[in-house]
Image: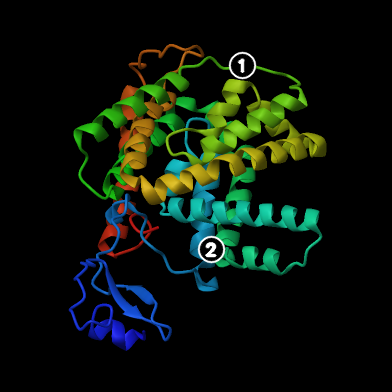
Amino acid sequence: MTGRDRRAGYGGSGAAAPSIPTPDHETDTDQNGFPVTSPSPQRPARPTTTDPEDEAPAVARATWRDAPGLMLRGGFVGMAEGVPGISGGTIALVVGLFDRLIDSAGQLVHALRVTVSAALRRSEGREVRAAFGVIDWRFLAPVLLGMAVVLVATLSLLAPLLEAHPVQVSSVFLGMIAVSILVPLRMMPHRPSPRDLLLIAGGAVVAFGLTSLPRVDVAQPPLWLVFVGAAIAINALVVPGVSGSFVLLTLGLYIPVQAALADRDLVFILTFAAGAAVGLGSFVKVLQWLLHHRRQVFLAVVTGLMIGSLRSLWPWQDGTTLLAPPSASAVGVSALLALAGGAVVWLALAWERRHGSPAVVHA
């Protein structure tokens, strides 16, 4: 019996075939009379578990004309990483680099894994070239160059200034970071819910506790500590509200890192770089997933971390886990410096918002 006979009558008797409901598919027969099903064009799309508004917005690839501005922004991030108590991730949020830096880091880690896998299998380099071709080098290269140059300059110039005038410098940065808390709040896809407020409070408690840890002095740290410390510090570098330099201070590695850079200690530097690469490779994918699938939750935690990290920028530190009371003779000047630092960030955010810059919201 052919497909036409099947449609004309049931079993060749002329009786109508029983009706079988097919809500999601349309049924037809092939040339041999067997049923063939195809999805109905009216079938509703499968619901997703991720709120589209909770995902990071897409950004066009950079051009070489953007390089000077990207180098400048990367320089701000590098400066932050050279000052204990200031998070490079926080500054990356403020200057609008954070999302793209995390995505680029994830792509770079993936490309390196593909390279290692291809080398072990002795395969052709086509997949390696494809993996590295995905990376937006016109964005990443200027940012990394600016970060590296200014970081080295900061360790040589700004760090001694912080040691000579800790109250004044800390006051400026305190005001800047306090106003910067507005950035993750503005980047949230939705208004903060009661759950988000709990996450903000939890992040603040965690950051306050971390910045209360006593600092350790290690004259000549073992290489395993250098490796582990770099892996932890690099993760602090990419998380807003947590200072990589402060982590190094807590582990007793901040001064040895400065000395190794000054003395060009290649063994120390390579060990530190290896630890940073391992730490970044193991954590950046987690951050990338959070940014694209749990953006509201991530930004709530980041807001709390930034609030709690203000403790490390309190101008009057007594060298222990306790905070010293403000000095009566310097409190007025410190307040003015904090207001000035906050005003700089406020004006920068207002300018970018007025001119429609993608730096803060759409980075």
Q: Which mark's residue is nearer the viewer, 1 or 2?
A: 2
Q: Using the rendered view, name the quadrant where residue 25 is placed.
A: bottom left
Residue 335 is at least partly visible in this image: yes
Regarding mark 2 in the picture, which secondary structure is present there? helix
Amino acid type at mark 2: Phe
Against 274, is 209 above or below? Answer: above
Q: Toward the viewer: 308 or 166?
A: 308
Q: Is residue 211 left or right of residue 274?
A: left
Q: Looking at the rendering, in which quadrant would you find the N terminus?
A: bottom left
Q: Name the residue rendered at 68%, 56% in the picture.
A: 114
* Helix, strand or loop status at disc 1: loop
The residue lying furthest to the front in this view is 13
Looking at the picture, the colour scheme in use is rainbow
Drawn side of residue 283 relative to residue 91, left or right: right
Q: Gap between marks 1 and 2, in whole Å?
A: 37 Å
- Up-down relation of residue 83 to residue 325 (above or below): below
Task: Give whichever of 24, 45 is nearer the camera.
Answer: 24
Q: Quadrant of residue 252?
A: top right
Residue 90 placement (x, y as % from top left): 43, 42
Q: Residues within 10 Å of mark 2 (few under 14, many from 20)?
A: many
Mark 1 is surrounded, within 10 Å at the Cα level, by few (under 14), some (14 to 19) or many (20 or more) other residues, namely: few
Q: Residue at x 31, y 31 (%)?
A: 199
Which residue position is annotated with label 1?
Answer: 216
| Residue located 36% across and 45% down the image | 294
Q: The residue under label 1 is which amino acid type?
A: Val
**Horizontal side of residue 333 vs 137, given as left or right:** left
Q: Residue 301: give x, y in percent of width and height.
A: 35, 35
Between 222 and 165, which is closer to the camera in this rendering?
222
N-terminal of the two: label 1 or label 2? 2
* Residue 298 x/y as whole percent: 37, 40
- Write down the residue under mark 2: 139
Q: What numbered label is drawn on residue 81? A: none
